[in-house]
Amino acid sequence: MLSKNTLKFIKSLQQKKFRKQEQSFFVEGAKNVTELLQSDFEITHLLCTKKFVEENHHLLPRAGGSLYEVSQKELESMGTFQSNDSALAVAKVKSNESFELDSNEWVIALDDVRDPGNLGTIIRIADWYGIKKILISNESADIYNPKVLHASMGSFTRIEFFYTDLANFFRKGNYAIYGAFLEGKNIYEVDFGSGGIILMGNESNGICPEVGKFVSQKITIPRFGQAESLNVAIATSIICDNVKRQEHIFSKSKK
């Protein structure tokens, strides 16, 4: 049976300060919980309905923490979903560790992307296009925000993240950085090469000058209509698609 302290602990993780204090986060819903159970995250609590237990019994041993069978009403009282008839899991956050960038891989970098939905969607986009690493500025949304995790649809379990001062990070290396600007070069005309960093900026202000000075090539998505701008997640998707299409055409031409 769930104690009041456990219930209070889980509910507190909706706030960033308590996620940081407890070094823990939660995910909810069948999709995110099953993805978490199949990942290398350390799971400390698994709360699920009888239905979820019956459908996913083979995954339950991976939880490794405290398992509670609860009602739908109890699940909904703890999380952020209005309706949750499956599960909620609590896991430990991963340490914020830097990673090496291979010259032949693509990485996404986010400069001050504040909206949790945008960040979660970009994580899902990265996963779709086989991009395994995302650099995130310290001012951006928290990847363990429930809204980010929900929007990622489990893709957060397959992506490496590193929160950092982007300007300092770029200063220490020699990277091919493609930055999204309204006044950039048409992405249909850019030779993206075999790897690099796709840099996306803040929803309202774009890439800040301090970070922008490290951009190797300013790029833009050509506009054919009257819209003033594109949502940052949509723009990321379009750029990734063009990068991968170019890779595909090049690989076919070598055969």
Image (cartoon, grey):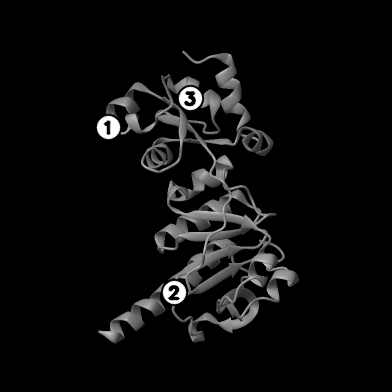
The disc placed on residue 33 is none
Q: Residue 184: x, y in percent?
A: 62, 81
The answer to which quarter of the image holds residue 39 is top left
Q: Residue 182: x, y in percent?
A: 65, 76
Instruction: Please tell me which residue is depicted at 43% across the width and 46% down the height of the picture.
Output: 154
Left/right of residue 15 with respect to residue 155 in the rendered view: right
Badge 3 marks a residue whose secondary structure is: helix
Q: Residues within 10 Å of mark 3 (few under 14, many from 20)?
A: many
The answer to which quarter of the image holds residue 245 is bottom left
The amino acid type, in three-letter code, at marker 3 is Leu
The amino acid type, in three-letter code, at marker 2 is Asn
Query: Which residue is label 2 attached to?
Result: 104
Q: Residue 249: x, y in percent?
A: 34, 81
- Are the residues flagged by discs 1 and 2 in contact, CB closer than 8 Å? no
Task: In the rendered view, tell whether residue 240 sits above or below residue 84.
Answer: below
The span from disc 1 to disc 2 (Cα, nearest Å) is 38 Å
Q: Decide which of tag 2 and tag 3 comes sooner along the chain.
A: 3
Nearest the eye: 25 or 221: 25
The residue at the far left in this view is: 255
Q: Residues within 10 Å of mark 1 (few under 14, many from 20)?
A: few
The amino acid type, in three-letter code, at marker 1 is His
Q: How many marks?
A: 3
Badge 2 marks a residue whose secondary structure is: loop
Query: Which residue is label 1 attached to?
Result: 58
Q: Decide which of tag 1 and tag 3 comes sooner along the chain.
A: 1
Query: Which residue is label 3 attached to?
Result: 75
Left/right of residue 100 with respect to residue 246 in the rendered view: right
Q: Residue 108: x, y in percent?
A: 53, 65
